[in-house]
Image: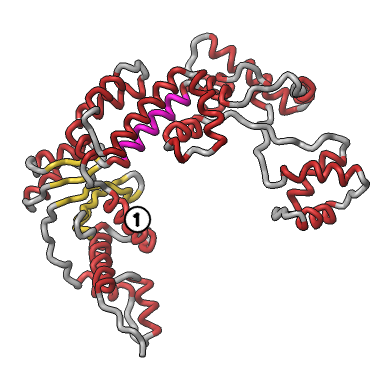
Amino acid sequence: MVLAGTGGSRMLRILNIRLSRVAVLSQLMRVPLPPLVTPRVLGVDDFALYGGIYGTLLVDATTRLPLTLWEGRDAEQLGRWLREHPGVEVACRDGSLTYRQGITAGAPEAVQVSDRFHLWQDLSRRVQDIAAAHRGCLPAALPTVSEDDPPPVEESTENAAADTRAGRHAQSLFEAVQALIRTGRSHSSVARELGLDRRTVGKYARARTWQEVVRRPPRKPSTLDPYLEYLRQRRDEGQHSEKILHEELQTKGYLGHYQRVKMAVAPLRRGLPIDEPRERPPSPREAARWITTHPHRRGPHINDRLPRLLDHCPELRTAHDLVRRFAAMLDNRDATSMPQWLKDLADTGLASLTGLARALREDRDAVAQGITTPYNSGVNEGRITDVKLQKRIMAGRAGVRLLRHRVVLIAHLRRRHADRPTVSPR
């Protein structure tokens, strides 16, 4: 059942049973499926079948066993199944309009529950969109540079970049893209004329100077950073062997590779300073993660930078306050403040949050059930992981009928073995 065709045939050869993969599959398909019992709590979710085609999986949320699956995710097919199997009282789903319509048509008396994980995920995506739209505010999260700190030397590196072939190429592309953008042309039109990718045109269009395009991004901190001063000291003392330096650092607790030490001291051989790490502004995804993380789980790094970012950007401050209010509703399992929260969400004037408020308002009852009830789609997600495993074993060569047969049978087989009493060895 688990190994199916080719794998099952190979396993049977070890037992001196010669069967082809076709014969094994034929025997597998003759195994009857267990009788389908209509569940009281039904889980509905979709999964990627192949090449942009999706399928629908139904799960008994009480027994955690899959019921059936089919190709497609249309409302008519789901409604037909629910009419043929009456008795569903609770239906757990994501925010899909298709599944909402199918459940309403097939089981109008069932209570629909919008999964809170998907609600939180959707809200987090909207916060990331706001952070991306206000990307210029993100550097405000960095600590302010003290007057005693030496200013970064960038003019010499920019002038050096202008003398390189890459710098001249970037400068010419920047001027060409900016000239066409100023005439009102779209990014796609500019990309077609210059023979560039649309994302490359967008990068040059967003840049204020051509140096921003070729400027090397700040180096990320590494585990070698605490030992950089020791490396400088040992080089000044005359120790130029990277292997010996690496061995000395190992005695001090460094666990990194020798090649990293060699790359770090390479500038010293050319008379240049060691490349110190410079902190980068947070990306929109990082800023969204800071905002959606519970305050008690934020580290000192986030607690130091997030207040500066929120003070600088009122839009992110608004998003942060709304996220924390929604998190409080989830923590307390209380949806009484949801109407006011949806109103404030729509009144922000931010397109991302306004669209979310409109979608949640249309599905208000299911959202309230998702906040207040213990039902969720966690069982669905676990079973979809099993479906993906069986798909990989079949390498995409089998059809939906065999996939359905194996997913249902394997789940019941595991349950049967898990419920079997263990016999202790004598």
How has the structure been colored for display? secondary structure
Badge 1: residue crowd in 10 Å (few <14, some 14–19, many ≥20): few
Residue linked to disc 1: 385
Q: Residue shown at 68%/22% (left/top)?
A: 145
Q: Please tell me whether the stretch drawn in magenta is mainly helix, strand or loop.
A: helix
Q: Residue shown at 52%/18% (left/top)?
A: 312
Q: Position of residue 315 (x, y in %)?
A: 43, 19
Q: Is 131 part of what is drawn in magenta?
A: yes
Q: Position of residue 242 (x, y in %)?
A: 83, 51
Of the pair 364 and 358, the residue shown nearer to us? 364
In the image, the segment drawn in magenta is 118-132
Q: Quadrant of residue 270?
A: top right
Q: Residue shown at 72%/46% (left/top)?
A: 224
Q: Is residue 257 left or right of residue 332?
A: right
Of the pair 340 and 345, the residue shown nearer to us? 340
Q: Is residue 370 left or right of residue 186?
A: left
Residue at the far right: name it.
238
Q: Residue shown at 36%/24% (left/top)?
A: 352
Of the pair 298 and 155, the residue shown nearer to us? 298
The amino acid type found where label 1 is placed reads Thr
Using the image, determine if residue 262 lies above or below residue 203.
Answer: below
Helix, strand or loop at disc 1? helix
